[in-house]
Structure formats: C-alpha cells, structure tokens
Amino acid sequence: MKNIQLLKSVLSKHSGECEHSIVANDTTSYELFFVHGKLETVRKAKHSSAQISVFVKHDGKLGSGSFVADESATEQELESKIAEALGNAKMIFDEPYELPCDDNQSGGVIPSNLGGRDEKQVAADIAKAVLSACTQKDCGINALEVFVTTRVNTVLNSKGVDKSQTKHTVSVEVIPTCNAESESVELFETYEFGNLDEQAIIREIAARVEDVSMRAKAVKPQEKIDCPVILNPYDIREMFEELVSDAQYSSVYLHTNLHSVGDKWQSEPAHDKLTITMRGIVDGSPASALFDKDGTSLCDKTIVKDGELVANFGASRFAQYLGKEATGALGCIDVEVGNTSISELQSTPHLECVYLSGLQVDLYNDYIGGEIRLAYYFDGEKRIPVTGIAMSGKLSEVLNNVTLSKEKVVSGSYSGPEKIKLGKMNIF
C-alpha cells in the first residue's frame, strides 16, 4: 500500500494515548468472463486498502476503534478518522490484553505452484479445462468466471510487528446447464484453489455436469430409504468447520463451548476415530497463511486425537484471557484419513448427497441434518438420482458411526477424507 508510511507517521503522533495496528491488503487479479463458452470480457484489477485499529486503556479496561482507509487517503482525512476511532475506543470496556510483540518472523510467500506463472496463461488453462470437461449431450457451461489473484497482506503494530505474506489463489465460478425435455436445469458452483491442478478441475466439472443432467431426472423415492449417508467435500467441510469452532479459545472464554479438553467427541466409535489438526498451511488450501490478522505466527495444533478433544486453539487476545499459548487464528482443518477406499464405501446400499440446501450442525441440540436437493441412492444394484427428501440424526450418535475414506482431498479450508459415510441417519 503506497501510503503505509503516511499511516505510520500519523499514528506515531498518537503513541502517547493509544496502541495501534495496521492490516494492509494489496490485491491484483486477472479475470476472464465467458458466456455460453465465448469469452466476453478480460479485466485486470488492482485494489489496496488497510484497516487501522487503535487501542486505548481507560478505567482499568481496554477499548478499540477501527476504520478502513484506501491509498488515496490524505493526512487530514486520516487524522479525522483516527480522532473518531479514539472516541469510539473510549466507549468500549473490554478486559485488557496486549497486542502481539515482534516474534522475529518476517512472513514470506505461501507455497503454491501458481507462484511465478504467467497469470494470463493460468487463466487460459483453467478456462480450457472447465470448457473441455463438458461433454454431456444437451449440456453446456452457461457462464464461467475465472480469477487469478495475488494478495499481499501486511500487518504492523506499535509493538514492533512488521511482516508481510504473499498468497496466490485461483477462483472459479461456473454454471453448468442441461436442457432436459421439459425444462432447463442449472447449478451454480464456486471453487477456490491454492494450487492449479487442471486434471482435477476437469474431473470436478465433468462430475458436476453429470449431476446437473441427473437433477433433471431425479425423483422423490416412493418408499422410505434406510441406509447410511455419504457426504462429499463441500458438506464435509461445513460439518468440520462447525465442530472445530467449539474448540476455539473465544468459545471457551465466552462459555459457548459444549466440550472441554478431555471430553470425548466420540464416546463409543464403531468405525473410525477422528483426529483433527488445525494448521496454518495446507498444500493447495486457499485458507493457508503464515500469520493471522494480529500478526501472530501460526503454530499447528492437534485438537482432537482418536475422538477426544485434547487441546483448544485461537488468537492472541483470548489466549491471554485464558492464560494459554496463542496458536494464532488457524484457518486450515486437517482431518486424518481412514482405511476404507471410496469404492468400498460405495459398494453397499447408501445415499450419497450431492446437493443440500445447507448442512445443519447444532452441537447444543445434538443435531445434524439438511434438505436434500440431489442425491444418488444405491440400493445394492442400481444408482438412482433422487430429490425432495431430507435427513437428520443425533450428532453424537452419527459421530460414533463415521467411516472415513482413505482418499484425501483439499477443499477450501478442509483437508481430509474425500468422502465420509455417516451411520444412524434418518432419511425421510
């Protein structure tokens, strides 16, 4: 950010009355927009901004105030915003905590095979992969958007933290469409990658094109289905994101956590035991980072071992409140895989969910469930596309009856089994 030195200079004038932090982001992206397979727009974008926070100690408490500034902000505008933020901070009465100090870690580049590659060629390769994956009759890619992005994130504070990290990612938004006999059916898909794997993109889009074709043929089952449920990466990620939030320092401090260290997530596991490690970096995950927004360097932490909660994790503020070591706000969830192949998981009767209205996971009410828009029911002989049904179960019982695939996948913040089979689910 061009005016970061100006920001530092203006904030230094207030060093006697407050601490401060600056979180700056500089983003450049190369973007392609297709309609019905035809390239319509090419765009290169650049954006820079910073969030500035001031921290004021008063009345035995700590108050904070924040504002956002772009690189066009003048010294006068910054002074005005700082004054307003200081006023807001004096009306906040949080328990005191200290900003992280310089830990001698300067940051760097997050590993990615996108680094150093020509952004135009990367975007073209992705578009080619997506469009080549659509081979189904009467199906096509209605719209496609590709974003090749480089982000430079810089964190500075009045305690000496001054570090930057560079991240390369690719985002894809695609709408596969199938023209059935009586209607046109489409699905909206979004993906974000930290590495480029063209063959994986082709396999994924081909599968989604098949799904949109099958959605037009899906029917509501005439009889009740009674079998295990298989989840795919997107819904697996949602499930684990909800589960691990219970182990954050912030949840413990605010007394919103259900489980404490030593409690068992799986009281009597019938199949696989869960082991989960929160990580700063997972190869290929767009959630990877070297440090969090406070400037705390990220330290991996295993939080669940063989179904038991063994540790909490979280950012500096709540770690201080609890007297724990800060791991930083770890963003990658790494789940150990199982010993069962996907082909084995799918060899017996099951319902494999492809599209849900949203997986619902409620720890306090011991609930997991969702409405099913599209799933494949395998009755032992045939694979039948179904819709118009729902599922639910007691979360504690379901977690005791999980079977994890040995094949691994990276999907957003999640790294772990590509498919998970859930027992004890009620399908209706």
Image: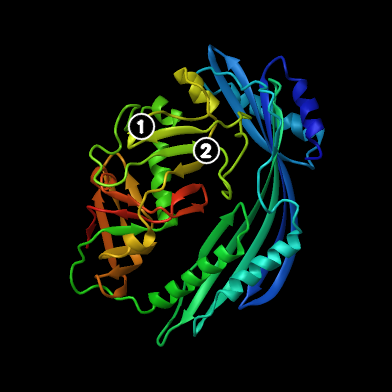
**Is residue 76 shown left or right of residue 64?**
right
Q: Position of residue 226 (x, y in %)?
A: 20, 62
The N terminus appears in which quarter of the rendering? top right
Q: Quadrant of the C terminus?
A: bottom left
Sooner in the amino-acid sequence: mark 1 or mark 2: 2
Res 42 quadrant in image: bottom right
**Can the viewer see residue 94 in this picture?**
no
Question: Please, is residue 138 above or below residue 155 in the view?
Answer: below
Q: Residue at x 29, y 64 (%)?
A: 351
Identify the image quadrant of residue 195.
Answer: bottom right
Position of 380 compared to 44: left or right?
A: left
Camera-side residue of 17 and 198: 198
Q: Mark 1 is on which residue type?
A: Leu
Determine the secondary structure under disc 1: strand
Q: Position of residue 107 (x, y in %)?
A: 69, 34
Position in image of residue 269 (x %, y %): 25, 42
Q: Which mark is residue 309?
A: 1
Q: Say which residue appears at 55% left-offset and 59% top-offset.
A: 191
Say which residue label 2 marks.
Answer: 279
Is 136 drawn above or below residue 94 in the view shown?
Answer: below
Q: Residue furthest bottom?
A: 181
Residue at 53% across, 70% down:
175
Residue 3 visible in this rendered orientation of the protein: yes
Q: Residue at x 32, y 31 (%)?
A: 259
